Image (cartoon, rainbow, N blue to C red):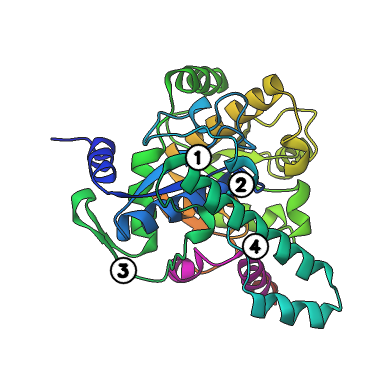
Amino acid sequence: MKDITESYKVLNQSFRKVLIYHVGIDAGFFAEYSYMVSAILYCLQHKIQFKLYSADANFGYDKGWNDYFIPFCEEVNEAFHHTYNTHAIPSWKEIIRRSFKQKNCALLKWKFKHVYRTFIGTILAIVTYKEKVRLNHHIKFNPNQHFYISELGIDGDYMHAFSKITEIVWRFNQNTAIKCRKLIEDLQLPLHYAGCQIRGGDKITETELIPSDYYIRIIKEKSEERTVFVLTDDYRIFQHLQKSWPEINWFTLCAANEQGYVNSEFTKTNSQKKEMQMMRFLSSMQILIDASFFVGSITTGPSLFLLRIHPHAYPVDCSVEDISKIIAAPIAIRSKLSTQYMNHCGQ
């Protein structure tokens, strides 16, 4: 029986129309990953061949996506994608509305600049590939629908489709697999454990941070595990967990000198440090994927990824029943819903 990734490759290569997707532009890894999955689904629905450009990916240290993962499609390397292949932004109507509301002409300049870039990108793509090639800004994706791609066993909502595409693309290459396996083995985790993600760092600029005790309460109520792996970007959070709940056996791969992740700083780090940080991050994600139970927030990328694919995941700031309704919503909406839910729980 053909592997799902091989089935995808055959199906993808059968399409005549082409879209070249630029991944790793300016967001955190899992935001970029989610955008890419949406682009893949868009292409499958419209019978467009998906190709990748990741040479400048903000999470990469040498080759982009292939630094960590096995290739799943053809990748291109033309440098013009760096500047001229970018995501779509709000319409003129929305930009003008915001400009008047904020009394800020900078938004109009931003829109003009974006229109110029996408126009140049479209022309350069035609000149380079001798045919009309779609780029990121051409994607008009709606996650709130039923997805049916029979060749890949996709027949369900966005969460189902996201999980199936993850089976196709989330495959560590040999170097990543070896290094992650070593990091995980050195932790000496027991066979069964729970997991959670507690963010600090630049996440506070997007949403209110959730106190640790909310996560612990859910773990104690919903799981029998008393060994917990925590994905955090601030070692002080890990120390607080150890001190406040000594009855739980805590594990982490967060380094003792880390005091909060800031994406803009991470993207500027040198290749060696970036690779080391990404290996610890991907190892942590694999540990959480393998956990018997997971608790996370709808406002953070890694947690959102796990809430989509983990069979026993529980949100700290949303009801389980509502996950599928808000899982693809923008961060502003998820942040608002998270705050409302937590305020209600605190009453």
Q: Earlier in the sequence, mark 3 or mark 1?
A: 3
Label 3 crowd (10 A; few <14 / some 14-19 / many >=20) = few
Quadrant including the N terminus: top left
Q: CA distance from mark 1 to mark 4?
A: 41 Å
In the depicted structure, whether residue 283 falls above or below residue 127: above
Give the SS element for disc 2: strand
From the top left corner, tell me how far across and down residue 93 is, in percent. 65, 80
Q: Earlier in the sequence, mark 4 or mark 3?
A: 4
In the depicted structure, whether residue 39 falls above or below residue 105: above
- Which residue is under mark 4? 115
- Which residue is under mark 2? 197
Q: CA distance from mark 2 to mark 4?
A: 38 Å
Which image quarter: residue 145?
bottom left
Left or right side of 258 for 293: left
Label 1 crowd (10 A; few <14 / some 14-19 / many >=20) = many
Assess whether mark 3 and mark 2 are in contact (beta carbons under 8 angstroms): no
In the picture, the disc for residue 288 is 1
Give the SS element for disc 1: helix
Amino acid type at circle 3 is His
Assess whether mark 4 and mark 1 are in contact (beta carbons under 8 angstroms): no
Q: Which is in the foreground here, disc 2 or disc 3?
A: 3
Q: Earlier in the sequence, mark 2 or mark 4?
A: 4
Q: Which residues are magenta?
A: 320-341
- Which residue is under mark 3? 146
In the depicted structure, whether residue 147 falls above or below residue 95: above
Quadrant including the C terminus: bottom right
Assess whether mark 3 and mark 4 are in contact (beta carbons under 8 angstroms): no
Assess whether mark 2 and mark 1 are in contact (beta carbons under 8 angstroms): yes
Amino acid type at circle 1 is Leu
Q: Earlier in the sequence, mark 1 or mark 2?
A: 2
